[in-house]
Image: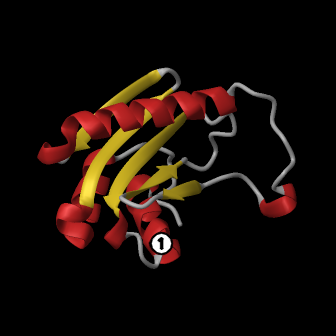
Amino acid sequence: MADGSLRPREVQAYVHDRAQDGLRGVAVYDGDDLDVRYARSDLEDDVAKRFGAVHESIRATTTAPEDDRWGTLGPERASIQIRDEAAVMHLRPTGDAAGQRGMLVELDARVAQSLTEFVASVRRVAFGEA
């Protein structure tokens, strides 16, 4: 079922089941609206600020003209920033060519191993697609 709906509760449960306390936060956005759905209690303010900054960056790039840097690879489904202390997955539902909707998931860096498989499984839970 690839309906493009965002399912943050399911993602939170799925990622928490696999990453335990390595899950730092989950947020969804729709255009200019950002909603932090979960932030680990010891990181709440930091996660909310970081998601806000990431969302601003996403909005800046989605309002810019589309570029062809990626050639024929197809539309973006997910991107991952891996930093010293954390990794942030940016998931986009298929069919949202304008990039107006998506989900952010922040993980401890130690959880960010084998991310290709992990991102694919989180996308199945998030959007009902591979």
Count of numbered tags: 1
Question: On the rendered structure, is 19 left or right of 68?
Answer: left
**Residue 3 makes an appearance in the image:** yes
Which quadrant of the structure image shows residue 124? Answer: bottom left
Q: How is the model colour-coded?
A: secondary structure
Question: On the rendered structure, is 80 left or right of 46?
Answer: right
Q: Is 72 situated above or below 69?
A: below
Please tell me which residue is depicted at 27% across the width and 63% down the height of the picture.
Answer: 14
Question: On the rendered structure, is 41 left or right of 114?
Answer: left
Query: Measured from the top left, where is residue 33 in percent x and y?
Result: 43, 22
Please tell me which residue is depicted at 49% across the width and 41% down the height of the picture.
Answer: 102
Q: Which residue is mark 1?
A: 115
Q: Residue furthest left?
A: 41
Which residue occupies the foreground of this view, 79 or 94?
79
Query: Measured from the top left, where is residue 4 in percent x and y?
Result: 51, 45
Please tell me which residue is depicted at 41% across the width and 63% down the height of the picture.
Answer: 122
**Which amino acid, mark 1?**
Leu
Q: Residue furthest front?
A: 84
**Residue 100 makes an appearance in the image:** no
Q: Is 26 situated above or below 21?
A: above
Please tell me which residue is depicted at 66% across the width and 52% down the height of the picture.
Answer: 76
Neighbourhood count class around disc 1 (C-alpha, 10 Å): few under 14, some 14–19, many 20 upward: few
Which residue occupies the foreground of this view, 18 or 126?
18
Question: On the rendered structure, is 111 left or right of 94?
Answer: left
Which quadrant of the structure image shows residue 108? Answer: bottom left
Q: Secondary structure at mark 1?
A: helix
Query: Measured from the top left, where is residue 49 in percent x and y?
Result: 34, 31
Which residue occupies the foreground of this view, 128 or 32?
32
Q: Residue furthest top?
A: 32
